[in-house]
Every structure is written in C-alpha cells, then in structure tokens.
C-alpha cells in the first residue's frame, strides 16, 4: 500500500477513511481504508526529510497491510483485524518547515480530508502549532520525530510521543561524559551551538543546565538564525572558545554550512557530539566527506541492533528497497510511530478519533516488539513514553556505529 500525497489521490481515499472513522460498521463490512495524515516538509530546504519519511511510512503500511514474518504488531496479519481487515493508508501535507503552514495544513487534513489521526512533523516548532490544531478538533497527534521537551508539557490530551525528548537525549550525553571521567578522560569544557527555533532553544537549555550540574564549563553559547546564509562569525567564536566538545543542534542545511565553514576556517574541535537532526542525515556526510569521520550524535536507533533483533534487518531491507538508503534515526522513528498508531487504531475497534486517543493512552507495547532499543512503549499522563532508551553513535567510515551505553555498544568510542 503506497502513501497518497496529492489532493486528488487523497480524495479517493477519504470516502473510505470517513466510513472507517465515523461509520465503523460499514468499514468492517466492506473492508474500507482508514486514513491518517502525515505532516512533513515536502518542498524547500528540508524536502528530502519528507521524501525519506514517506518511504518510512510506506514501509510501515506494507508491514501493516500485508503478511510479514516479523515480530511486530499486525505484521503477521493483513490490515486491521479488529476492523475486519480494513487497510491503513496515509495522506501527506507539506508544511514547508513553517509553523503556521503546519497549523493550517493540520486543519485542512482534519476538516477536508477527514483523517482520523495525525503523525509528524520533523520540526518541533511545527509540531507545536499543528498539535494544538489537532487538540482543538479532538484528533490524536503522534509526534514521531520531534524532540522538544516542552511539547508534552502543555496539558494536551490528544498529544503523544513514543521517542525520547531532548532532556532524555542530553542526559545520555552527560552520562557518557561521566563514563569518560571514570576512564580518566574528563570533559571540562563544551561549546553550545543551536538554531533559534524551539528545537534549538530547548536543546541548549537542558545542555546548559546539565553542564552546570556536572561542573563542565560552557565556554561558548551561540544561538544562530535558522537557515542563515553565513555562519562565519559564529564559527570564528567557536574557534576562539576552543572547547573540548562542540555540541550542535542544527537541521541538515545548517549542519552542512557549519561543517563546511569550520573546514574553511581551519576549526577542528577535539570532539563533536550532535543533537541528531542534520547529523543523522546521509546528505550531510555526502556533502562533507572525510570531515565527518569521528562525529558523534545521539540517536534512538542503530542498524547494529540487527545483531540482536532480526526484525531490524528485515525492516531495513524493505525500507532500502523503496528508498535506496538504510534506516536512520529519523526514518526508524517514523516507521515505529506508524506501527504504534496502527496498533492503537486496531485496538480502538471503531477507528473513531476519541477511541484511537483512548487506545493510544492505554498502549503498553514491549520493546522487543519494536525495532528500537526501548524497554517498552507506554505513555504517561502527558502523552510521553519514558521507557525509550537513547544511544550514542559515532561515524566510522561510511556509517555510524553504537558506542554508548555499554549494553548496546558494538565498538569503543574513539576519543582524542
């Protein structure tokens, strides 16, 4: 089952979605489709993120709607058993990395395309506005790949997030620093470099806080304008500060510009530990080549897990057949979000938004039934899963390998 992205294609599906959402008896009798909405950048600087996300969701829909030998929810059946085999479909909207466009597109998907739930959005700033729109219409919203901690602290009843937020990610980074200290390699100074949206601000806030608690000096604290045409002045400040660890929070275009500007100005910090985003993307490493060797990032996923979880390798094969790429942190989270949403829709037994919301709230999925290194998926009263386990990856040659924590590491970190 392919994702549907055009208004005309979406319209062909909506009749089935409406029947599934608001007339469940008809959906069960006729095996109609249940349609959820995906909000992603499909044009502009971040368009590749949206393209890759569609491949991830197409992979999930294939697993959900067809039989597969995988230890994942709904994989061994066809469609949604509790809705008489109704198939799950998605229709996408382009938020263009604009929070207000994201809000408007969320409302359009809800009011015109009659989707029963929303998933998205890559940028936390867009999730912030789109999820408020979903709340207004009592439509479940699952943040697949957004990490701002503030998102689940707004008192929303229809917002859920299965993956870690930046406080959890950053705690893992500083746990790593503690481990290095025990090994006689203490980190004494860091430089914060972050874009000026909610993602960057929230990331820097928690990094600043934990650095203070650990007695690590923040020798540079630089906020820059997202999608800036130049980062020369900022990189000059970073070079002058000469921190042991550079900790960037940047989306792909900015991350490429940062690394290229660093090369031009001869700035090579002893270590880079990134807050994912652009540093999870192959596009970055295609652009910077050997400069990426040794870069570290936090993550929720690594292909190394295939050594312990056969489903990881099998799902990666399905994804790669569509995209030509391996799963990464973002696409793995997107695939997992679709599986969680499908499981909730199936358990709702009606496909109605309120029932889906209640089923999401009752989710208790063991970690071994996901492709992630998580203990389980279980949402707290704020809609956040607190049992998801971050990992740290380091770039070696043409791939990332897991280096922390020890129970998931397949290699020792290379540390200068």
Image (cartoon, rainbow, N blue to C red):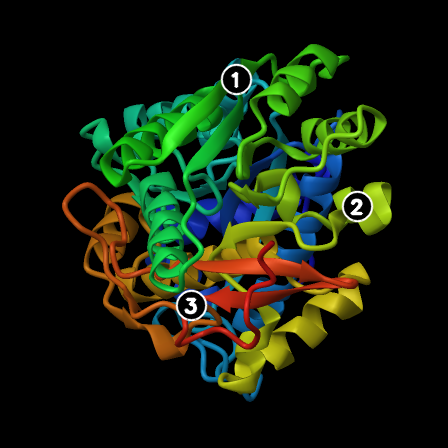
- Residue 185 on image: x %, y %: 44, 55
Image quarter where the N terminus lies is: bottom right
Report the residue marked by disc 2.
291
Helix, strand or loop for disc 1: strand
Residue 128, compared with residue 370, is above or below; it is above
Residue 136, compared with residue 383, is above or below; it is above
Mark 2 surroundings within 10 Å by alpha-carbon count, few (fewer than 14), some (14 through 19), many (20 or more): some
In the displayed structure image, the side of residue 238 where residue 230 appears, left or right: right
Disc 2 and disc 3: Cα gap in Å? 58 Å
Residue reaching furthest to the left: 381
Report the residue marked by disc 3.
29
Contact between labelled residues 1 and 2, with CB atoms less than 8 Å apart: no
Q: Residue at x 26, y 47 (%)?
A: 384
Disc 1 and disc 3: Cα gap in Å? 58 Å
Disc 2 and disc 1: Cα gap in Å? 22 Å
- Residue 216 on image: x %, y %: 35, 36
In the displayed structure image, the side of residue 327 where residue 336 appears, left or right: left
Foreground residue among 4 and 266? 266
User: Residue 272 lies in what quarter of the image?
Assistant: top right
Q: Residue at x 47, y 34 (%)?
A: 190
- Residue 215 on image: x %, y %: 28, 36
- Residue 132 on image: x %, y %: 34, 24
Q: Nearer the viewer, mark 1 or mark 3?
A: 1
Helix, strand or loop for disc 3: helix
In the displayed structure image, the side of residue 69 where residue 116 appears, left or right: left
**Disc number for residue 222:** 1
């Amino acid at each position: 089952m392919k994702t549907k992205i055009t208004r005309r294609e979406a319209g062909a599906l909506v009749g089935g979605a409406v029947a599934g959402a608001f007339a469940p008896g008809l959906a069960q009798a006729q095996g109609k489709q249940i349609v959820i909405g995906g909000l992603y950048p499909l044009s502009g600087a971040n368009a590749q993120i949206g393209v890759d996300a569609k491949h991830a969701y197409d992979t999930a829909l294939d697993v959900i709607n067809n039989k597969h030998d995988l230890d994942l929810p709904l994989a061994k059946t066809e469609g949604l058993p509790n809705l008489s085999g109704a198939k799950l479909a998605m229709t996408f909207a382009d938020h263009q990395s604009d929070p207000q466009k994201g809000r408007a597109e969320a409302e359009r998907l809800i009011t015109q395309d009659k989707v029963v739930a929303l998933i998205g959005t890559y940028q936390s700033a867009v999730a912030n506005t789109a999820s408020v729109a979903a709340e207004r219409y009592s439509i479940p919203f699952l943040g697949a790949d957004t990490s701002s901690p503030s998102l689940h602290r707004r008192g929303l009843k229809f917002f859920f997030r299965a993956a870690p937020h930046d406080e959890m990610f950053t705690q893992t980074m500083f746990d790593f620093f503690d481990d290095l200290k025990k090994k006689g390699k203490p980190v004494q100074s860091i430089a914060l470099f972050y874009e000026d949206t909610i993602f960057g601000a929230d990331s820097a806030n928690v990094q600043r806080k934990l650095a203070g608690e650990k007695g690590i000096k923040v020798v540079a604290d630089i906020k820059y304008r997202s999608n800036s045409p130049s980062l020369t002045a900022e990189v000059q400040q970073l070079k002058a500060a000469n921190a042991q660890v550079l900790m960037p929070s940047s989306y792909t275009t900015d991350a490429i510009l940062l690394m290229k500007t660093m090369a031009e100005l001869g700035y090579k910090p002893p270590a880079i530990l990134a807050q994912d985003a652009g540093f999870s993307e192959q596009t970055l490493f295609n652009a910077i080549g050997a400069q990426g060797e040794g870069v570290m990032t936090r993550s929720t996923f690594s292909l190394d897990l295939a050594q312990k979880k056969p489903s990881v390798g099998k799902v990666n094969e399905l994804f790669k057949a569509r995209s030509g790429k391996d799963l990464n942190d973002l696409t793995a989270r997107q695939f997992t979000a679709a599986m969680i949403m499908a499981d909730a829709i199936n358990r709702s037994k009606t496909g109605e938004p309120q029932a889906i919301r209640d089923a999401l709230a009752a989710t208790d999925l063991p970690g071994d039934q996901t492709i992630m290194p998580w203990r389980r998926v279980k949402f707290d009263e704020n809609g956040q899963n607190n049992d998801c386990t971050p990992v740290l990856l380091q770039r070696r040659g043409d791939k990332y390998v897991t280096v922390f924590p020890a129970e998931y590491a397949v290699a020792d970190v290379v540390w200068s």
